[in-house]
Image (tube, rainbow, N blue to C red):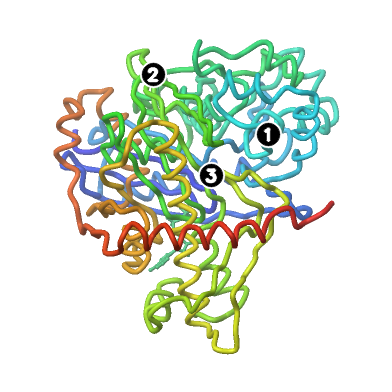
């Protein structure tokens, strides 16, 4: 056996990467798919298109590395989290488009649950806050708005799943209806302490139990492939949500180790071991992975707009032609000239959770140029992450020793240096930045003995570059105080 095949089903594209025994990429393939915006604030995907693109890139990756079925030890799945699919068990057809994690259509039902006083219960049981981000209210919306869905769900004719569940179902020819504990922990329906679907929460959201998948380990054989386009009988041996997979792929196996992913948004996760600390600072407590029935938890901070702010400079303002151009433009000025850009383009995530905040640029003077704005954009990404780290240290009682990073925007050296300056700890960029897919591969490979243990995996993790802090703590504190003033000005802006 030569390889593990990781399926990385992301928000904008489906990817497949084959990894060899040394953790190196043997082959990869990627396909974008349609983003459907039926109304402002709504975001949908066609689940069948997700399946087709995912299956096709898997088969392309195998072909391009000339890998045959006998070379593949296992398949690992990692996925955009929270996105909600509801399908017919008999036909395997979705009853509606999938509702994507970014979709805000259930913000008012979250408000209603909060006003009814239910948020403390949801938080205590699930580790989450009541936000439209998570699957529970999206599933309830589908049951209430797709004709006949609720009756069919009660009769056991429909199945619910996040994207991992949907892919495992399709890959196994409708045999497996499973989700791993990390994905389950993003639904608002799963008790992260008892590790069971929670009847009281299901009752509050009026969700029939018959819809729910079985919750399985993140590492372990759950099914075998049986579908068109892929070799039969390959074991599906690992499943984890994308951010949890990245934590594993960064080899953050020990409590206190943390990673930050700089993609469309930023997702900072700190391993908290077998403890599930309740957050006092509006971070999420979430399942990192479950292995051999034992759960490892994490604290998570999610920032909705990070690299997407760079895309907005490119597509919305046209002040750069390509995302990588931001570094040189931002480096052409010594600082942001007093400009602060709060990229609350779709509200603010952790730790503010303000869906009504909107993008705000303050401190503009006659001397402000597009270079200052470019620099303020990179700084905004670093400021938002610094706020998360601050909250995390307060919640966990663990001071960070270093921050491991991944994601597309880590290509910006200026961003990485700014981040180290604000945090006061080294920021470490690994050689392989495909950590999400790698994490899924590791979870699957460990399950089938392709890799021996965590130590072997940790030994494969290698640094590309370390960014050491080069700013006094007082200097960093002053900058953060200014940033927080700017955030205040962005808040509570949009009114329904
Ligand atoms: P996702 O998985 O969320 O789609 P990626 O990890 O692929 O995100 O990262 C894409 C993001 O990285 C984009 O938002 C883009 O703005 C940013 N990005 C890509 N290249 C660079 C670069 N060289 N410098 C700064 N940002 C970049």
- Residue receiving disc 3: 52
Mark in the foreground, 2 or 3: 2
Of helix, strand and loop, which one carries label 3? helix
Using the numbered discs, state the Cα–Cα distance from disc 2 to disc 3 in whole angstroms.
32 Å
Of helix, strand and loop, which one carries label 1? loop
Q: Is residue 360 left or right of residue 311?
A: right
Relative depth, front residue between 139 and 474:
474
Q: Are marks 2 and 1 in contact (CB under 8 Å)?
A: no
Among numbered discs 3 and 1, the one appearing first in the sequence? 3
Is 349 rendered above or below residue 483?
Answer: above
CA neighbours of label 1 inside 10 A, class few (<14), some (14 to 19), many (20+): some
Residue 188 figure quarter: top right
- Disc number for residue 295: 2
Using the numbered discs, state the Cα–Cα distance from disc 3 to disc 1 in whole angstroms.
13 Å
CA neighbours of label 3 inside 10 A, class few (<14), some (14 to 19), many (20+): some
Indicate the position of residue 208 as horizontal and vertical percent values.
Answer: 72, 15
Q: How many marks?
A: 3
**Residue at figure coordinates x 73%, y 49% from the top left:** 42
- Residue receiving disc 1: 94
Among numbered discs 2 and 3, the one appearing first in the sequence? 3
Residue 485 figure quarter: bottom right
Q: Is residue 149 left or right of residue 433?
A: right
Indicate the position of residue 407 as horizontal and vertical percent values.
Answer: 39, 54
Q: Is residue 373 left or right of residue 353?
A: left
Q: Are marks 3 and 1 in contact (CB under 8 Å)?
A: no
């Amino acid at each position: 056996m030569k390889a593990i095949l990781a399926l990385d089903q992301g928000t904008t594209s489906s990817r497949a990467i084959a990894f060899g025994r040394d953790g190196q990429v043997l082959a990869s393939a990627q396909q974008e798919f349609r983003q459907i915006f039926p109304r402002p604030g709504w975001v949908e995907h066609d689940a069948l298109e997700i399946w087709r693109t995912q299956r096709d890139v898997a088969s392309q990756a195998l072909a391009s590395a000339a890998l045959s079925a006998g070379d593949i030890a296992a398949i690992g799945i990692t996925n955009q989290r929270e996105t909600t699919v509801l399908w017919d068990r008999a036909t395997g057809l979705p009853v509606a488009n999938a509702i994507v994690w970014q979709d805000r259509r259930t913000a008012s039902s979250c408000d209603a649950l909060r006003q009814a006083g239910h948020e403390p219960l949801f938080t205590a049981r699930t580790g989450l806050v009541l936000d439209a981000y998570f699957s529970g209210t999206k599933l309830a919306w589908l049951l209430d708005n797709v004709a006949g869905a609720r009756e069919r769900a009660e009769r056991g004719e429909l199945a619910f799943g996040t994207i991992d569940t949907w892919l495992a179902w399709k890959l196994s020819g409708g045999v497996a209806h499973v989700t791993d504990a990390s994905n389950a922990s993003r639904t608002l329906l799963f008790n992260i302490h008892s590790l069971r679907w929670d009847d009281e929460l299901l009752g509050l959201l009026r969700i029939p139990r018959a819809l729910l998948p079985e919750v399985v380990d993140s590492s372990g054989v759950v099914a075998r492939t049986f579908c068109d386009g892929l070799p039969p009988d390959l074991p599906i041996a690992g499943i984890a949500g994308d951010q949890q997979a990245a934590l594993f792929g960064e080899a953050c196996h020990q409590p206190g180790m943390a990673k930050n992913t700089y993609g469309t948004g930023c997702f900072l996760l700190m391993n908290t071991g077998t403890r599930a600390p309740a957050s006092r600072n509006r971070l999420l407590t979430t399942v990192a992975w479950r292995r051999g029935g034992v759960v490892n938890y994490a604290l998570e901070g999610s920032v909705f707009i990070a690299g997407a702010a760079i895309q907005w400079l490119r597509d919305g303002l046209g002040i750069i032609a390509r995302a990588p151009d931001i570094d040189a433009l931002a480096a052409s000025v010594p600082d942001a000239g007093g400009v602060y850009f709060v990229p609350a383009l779709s509200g603010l995530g952790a730790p503010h959770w303000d869906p009504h905040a909107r993008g705000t640029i303050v401190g503009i003077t006659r001397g402000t140029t597009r270079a200052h704005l470019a620099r303020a954009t990179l700084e905004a990404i670093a400021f938002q992450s610094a706020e998360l780290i601050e909250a995390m240290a307060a919640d966990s009682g663990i001071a960070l020793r270093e921050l491991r990073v991944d994601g597309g925007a880590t290509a910006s050296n200026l961003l990485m240096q700014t981040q180290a300056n604000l945090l006061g700890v080294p920021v470490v960029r690994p050689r392989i930045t495909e950590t999400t897919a790698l994490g899924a591969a590791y979870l699957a490979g460990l399950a089938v003995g392709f890799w021996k243990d965590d130590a072997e995996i940790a030994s494969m993790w290698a640094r590309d570059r370390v960014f050491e802090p080069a700013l006094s703590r007082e200097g960093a504190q002053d900058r953060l105080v200014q940033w927080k003033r700017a955030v205040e000005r962005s808040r509570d802006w949009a009114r329904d």
